């Protein structure tokens, strides 16, 4: 081992201690928030659910322009009008993020009509809500195309310009189910796990790219029509998140350049438990909490 390598090895634990202390200090003395007055924010799935609340929150925080993408014009138009009434410039475009050519075409239209996107929020998602053997093949493909591959296409469309400007942020509204799957949502859990890996790799790939950051949000069950009918055993102990809470914490994470956000914070405990508990114990936790059967009453939107 040469002297340079030896020095790096000795310095490494000091770096780890420094970053841990820095993170602890930031809990009590928050870092400077991102000024969004010059940001152009694009939200996929922006017409309803968490997407609509994200649009409201970005507008509240002073974003310069908002762009909404989705597949249902009625919802997009309603949300767009609401944001305009808040005093923020807003545009909407019909776009299925699972369609690569459509994404690239609409991205070109956005650049020409609105300008360069500086914050991309990959929020669009679908859930089929059935077991593997009960799932239609086309429905399974739809989940993968929208929930996972859609992020490839949107990020490829807008990231290059962010890198040129040295100003940008890519956000993924993921799910804690990417880390702890449940029966009856195999399409959703699989696609979200892939999406999480995508964001983890992207985040590391941008380490040497100044001015461009990422945020991955992993919320617990959120009270939207997408997962309507889903039931856990102890709703008072594990209440569903409010979409406005997810939106507010997401925008706050972007402003603080936070890479990873679990909602609520107790989800950290679930990930820790999975790292050392035997499979049989984890299975009993699923049964006890009701997550083993929570999708039996599912009747949400796909």
Image (cartoon, grey):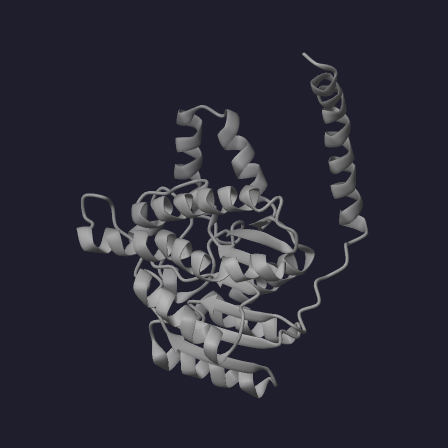
Question: What residue is rendered at 58% in x and 63% in y?
Answer: 245
Q: Is residue 240 visible?
A: no
Question: What residue is rendered at 41% in x and 75% in y?
Answer: 109
Question: What residue is rendered at 72% in x and 31% in y?
Answer: 16
Q: Position of residue 299 (x, y in %)?
A: 30, 61
Q: Position of residue 229 (x, y in %)?
A: 35, 60
Residue at far bottom of view: 85
Who is closer to the viewer here, 224 or 62?
Answer: 62
Who is closer to the viewer here, 180 or 168?
Answer: 168
Residue at far top of view: 1
Image height of 202 relative to 67, above or below: above
In this picture, residue 186 sits left or right of residue 211: left
Q: Position of residue 187 (x, y in %)?
A: 30, 48
* Residue 197 sits in quarter: top left
Q: Is residue 153 visible?
A: yes
Question: What residue is rendered at 51% in x and 46% in y?
Answer: 202
Q: Quadrant of the N terminus?
A: top right
How many numbered tags mark residues here?
0
Q: Quadrant of the C terminus?
A: bottom left
Q: Position of residue 183 (x, y in %)?
A: 32, 43
Who is closer to the viewer here, 165 or 225?
Answer: 165
């Amino acid at each position: 081992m040469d002297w340079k390598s030896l020095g790096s090895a000795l310095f490494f634990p000091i770096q780890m201690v420094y970053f841990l202390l820095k993170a602890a200090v930031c809990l009590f003395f928050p870092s400077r928030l991102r000024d969004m007055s010059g940001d152009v924010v694009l939200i996929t799935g922006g017409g309803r659910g968490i997407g609509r609340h994200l649009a409201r929150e970005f507008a509240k925080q002073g974003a310069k322009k908002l762009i909404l993408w989705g597949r249902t014009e009625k919802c997009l138009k309603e949300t767009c009008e609401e944001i305009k009434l808040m005093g923020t410039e807003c545009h909407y475009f019909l776009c299925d993020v699972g369609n690569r050519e459509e994404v690239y075409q609409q991205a070109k239209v956005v650049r020409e009509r609105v300008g360069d996107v500086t914050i991309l929020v990959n929020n669009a998602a679908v859930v089929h809500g059935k077991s593997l053997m009960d799932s239609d093949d086309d429905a399974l493909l739809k989940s993968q195309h929208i929930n996972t591959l859609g992020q490839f296409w949107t990020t490829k469309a807008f990231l290059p310009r962010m890198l040129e400007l040295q100003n940008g942020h890519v956000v993924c509204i993921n799910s804690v189910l990417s880390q702890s799957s449940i029966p009856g949502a195999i399409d959703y859990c699989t696609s979200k796990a892939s999406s999480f890996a995508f964001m983890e790799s992207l985040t590391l790939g941008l380490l040497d790219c100044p001015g461009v950051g990422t945020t991955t949000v992993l919320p617990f069950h959120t009270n939207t029509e997408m997962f309507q009918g889903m039931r856990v055993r102890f709703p008072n102990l594990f209440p569903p998140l409010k979409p406005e809470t997810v939106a507010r914490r997401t925008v706050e994470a972007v402003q603080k350049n936070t890479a990873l956000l679990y909602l609520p914070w107790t989800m950290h405990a679930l990930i820790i438990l999975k790292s050392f508990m035997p499979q049989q114990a984890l299975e009993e936790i699923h049964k006890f909490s009701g997550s083993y059967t929570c999708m039996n009453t599912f009747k949400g939107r796909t």
